[in-house]
Each structure stands twice: as structure tokens, then as C-alpha cells.
Image (cartoon, grey):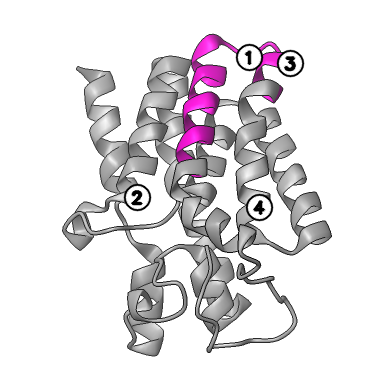
Amino acid sequence: MQTLLLILGGYLLGSLPFGYWVVRGFKHVDIRTVGSGNIGATNVWRTYGRWYGLPVVLLDVLKGFVPAFVATHQVGHLAGVLAGGAAMLGHARPIFLRFAKGGKMVATCGGVFLGVAPVVAVAGMALWIIVFLVFRYASVASIVASLSLAPVAIGLGEPWPVWAFGLVAGIAVLVLHRANLKRLFRGQEHRFKLRRRDRSLPVGG
């Protein structure tokens, strides 16, 4: 019963659409109508700059971290990844947006791993930063970092729920980025720019 409540709490927390709320509250715009149309931090950052994107990143990480951390320490790793997975599902299909399409779960996934396996999370984040700085594609960095989670967890000897969850999460992130991959192969994927705010970019993660 406790695990079920933690899973439900994870889904509800993950459903908090911070990207939508931040832009709606400060810019009076529906983030789903601009940029890539995604409510995640990448689209917020790309469209309105880091002062809006960075808080959304942190909030999206936090809503994955809290349920995963609480469930792991109260019950165990299996409960932690289930609650964290529910938060990711909530981010992708938030109840507070009537189950409309949400974000691509990358930041929330990072938060989940911070809660259940911090070393794996740090390794994934470091790889994300390296790939992003080299190629400047947020989508490529997200896919590579997500797919690395399961191998890193296995290499570090993490419990089976952690690496199994890493495998599922990596596949899920890959599937959610299939449109980005198509644009990448066509040479149409947007290279991220950190130093200039650009509100006219049509595509993104």
C-alpha cells in the first residue's frame, strides 16, 4: 500500500507542468504554441532564454528526485524507480494538462537517478554536458546520456531495479526523440545557442 501511494504521489508530482506554468505566468504565452511546442526546459530555454529555462530545468529535476529519493529510503530501490518512473510518466502525460503531450522526461529522469543512484546520475549528467558541448544538439546529448544509464549502473554494481529502470528510461527517451532524430538525419535539427536568445526557432527538443 505504501508503495502504491508513493507511485501515485510520484505521478502527481511529475504532472506539475512547470515549463507551461512559468511561461504562462511571466510571459502570458502558452509554451505549446511557440518553438518546438514542447513544455520541457529545452524549449523554454531556447525560446525565452536561460533565466526562464534554468528554473524549469531545476524544477523538472526536482520533481523526479523527490519521489524517487523518498521511496528509495522508505521502501527500497524497486519502489524508488517505480515512483520515479511514475513521475516521468506524469511529465510526459500530465494530469494537470488533461493528459496532453508533455515533456520528453530527460531532466526528470536525471532527477530520478539522483534519488536512487546519485553516482549514475552524475555520470549521465557529465556525459550529457560533454556531448552537448561537442555537438551542440540537446537532443543528441539527451539520447546518449539516457542510453548510458543502464551500462553505467551495471558497471557500478547497482541493484537490478536501477539498471533495469535505466534500460527502460533510455529506450523511452530515445522513442520520445524520434522526431529529433529524423530532423538530424535531414540536417534540420537545431544547434543550441547559449549566448543569444532567439524566439523564432521552429524546431527543438
Q: Looking at the image, is mark 2 or mark 1 earlier in the sequence?
A: 2
Q: Looking at the image, is mark 2 or mark 4 earlier in the sequence?
A: 2
* Residue closer to the observer: 172 or 156: 172
Q: Residue 72: x, y in percent?
A: 46, 22
Q: In terms of secondary structure, where does tag 4 sit? A: helix
Q: In terms of secondary structure, where does tag 1 sit? A: loop
Quadrant for residue 146, please give it. top right
Quadrant for residue 74, please give it. top left
Amino acid at the residue labelled 1:
Glu
Badge 4: how crowded within 10 Å, few (<14), some, or many (20+)? Answer: many
Q: Nearer the viewer, mark 2 or mark 4?
A: 4
Q: Which residue shows up at 38% across the image and 20% down it?
A: 79
Residue that numbered label 3 is attached to: 155
Amino acid at the residue labelled 3:
Gly
Q: Residue 165: x, y in percent?
A: 48, 24
Amino acid at the residue labelled 2:
Ala
Regarding residue 122, the answer to whether it shows in the image is: yes
Residue that numbered label 2 is attached to: 92
Q: Nearer the viewer, mark 3 or mark 1?
A: 3
Q: Looking at the image, is mark 1 or mark 4 earlier in the sequence?
A: 4
Gap in angstroms between the C-alphas marked 1 and 4: 26 Å
Q: Which residue shows up at 63% across the image and 30% down it?
A: 149
Mark number, residue 158:
1
Amino acid at the residue labelled 4:
Val
Q: Looking at the image, is mark 4 or mark 3 earlier in the sequence?
A: 4
Boundaries of the magenta span: 152-173
Residue that numbered label 4 is attached to: 140
Residue 154 falls within the magenta-colored stretch = yes
Magenta segment main secondary structure: helix
